[in-house]
Amino acid sequence: MVHMTGFLSDLQAGRSSSTVQVRLLRYWEARNFRRGGELMGVDMLLLDSQTTMMQASVNSHRIPKFRETLTADKMFTLSSFDVISCTRNLKITESPFIIRFNDYTEFIEMTTPSSPLPLEAFRFLSGTELLRLANTNSQLTDVVAEVTGVKSNVRNPPKKKIIS
């Protein structure tokens, strides 16, 4: 199968023949606490060179194949995976899709991407937008800071502004 290099934003639902270069931002175990904490898989947050973030998931029976590879902040080429629609209660990014690793998935660490991969990504929302998302379970949000005003820290500002 010929792998086309692409971006996370280009992906469509179904089996993907694309190869994407991503940074693994974070990963965590997904557990079912209704079943005594049973391990369901490993979820991760991926970021590409266009700063598109997408969630990816490895089912519990495939974890042994990828466990040694999973390292946060490392860069990878990802190919031969499934792209599925994101259910509302699992959505942690703006993407309508999630990547699912399958038996043929390749997740190979790389040192030099063809395009620089950002170290992190942030999304800025207004207070109104945050309130609209409150208690909807449609997106996982976290408030890092809120700017409430900008004030000079100069005690005696000059009478005239000097522009040079």
Image (cartoon, rainbow, N blue to C red):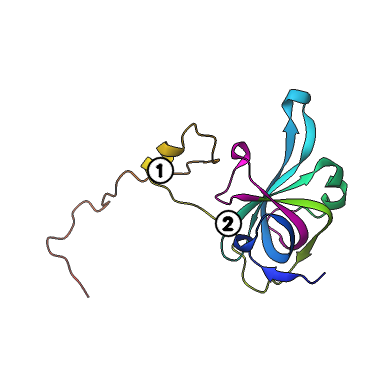
Q: In the image, is 153 to the left or to the right of 137? A: left
- Residue 90 inside the magenta-drawn segment: yes
Q: How many labels, in total?
A: 2
Which residue lies at the image location 82% right of the left edge and 41% below the top edge?
Answer: 60
138 or 118: nearer the viewer: 138
Q: Quadrant of residue 109?
A: bottom right
Quadrant holding the N terminus = bottom right
User: What residue type is disc 1 on?
Assistant: Glu
> Is 151 placed left or right of 28 in the picture?
left
Q: Quadrant of the C terminus?
A: bottom left
**Bounds of the magenta span?**
71-97
Q: Position of residue 76 (x, y in %)?
A: 73, 62
What type is the residue that disc 2 sits on?
Answer: Glu
Residue 9 found in image quarter: bottom right
Q: Secondary structure at mark 1?
A: helix
Foreground label between 1 and 2: 1
Query: Which residue bears the numbered disc 2?
Result: 120
**Element under disc 2:** loop
Could you tell me residue 71's position as x and y percent? 74, 53
Please tell me which of labels 1 and 2 falls first in the chain. Answer: 2
Percent across and percent down for residue 92 are: 59, 44
Q: CA distance from mark 1 to mark 2?
A: 22 Å
Q: Residue at x 50, y 34 (%)?
A: 136
Check contact, mark 1 vs mark 2: CB within 8 A.
Answer: no
From the image, tell me which residue sits under label 1: 129
- How many C-alpha atoms fall within 10 Å of the one at disc 1: few (<14), some, or many (≥20)? few
Mark 2: give few (<14), some (14-19) or many (20+) Cα within 10 Å.
Answer: some
**51 inside magenta stretch:** no
Rendered image: mark on residue 104:
none
Q: Residue furthest left?
A: 159
The residue at the point 40 percent across, 43 percent down is 129
Q: Judge left or right: residue 105 versus residue 128.
A: right
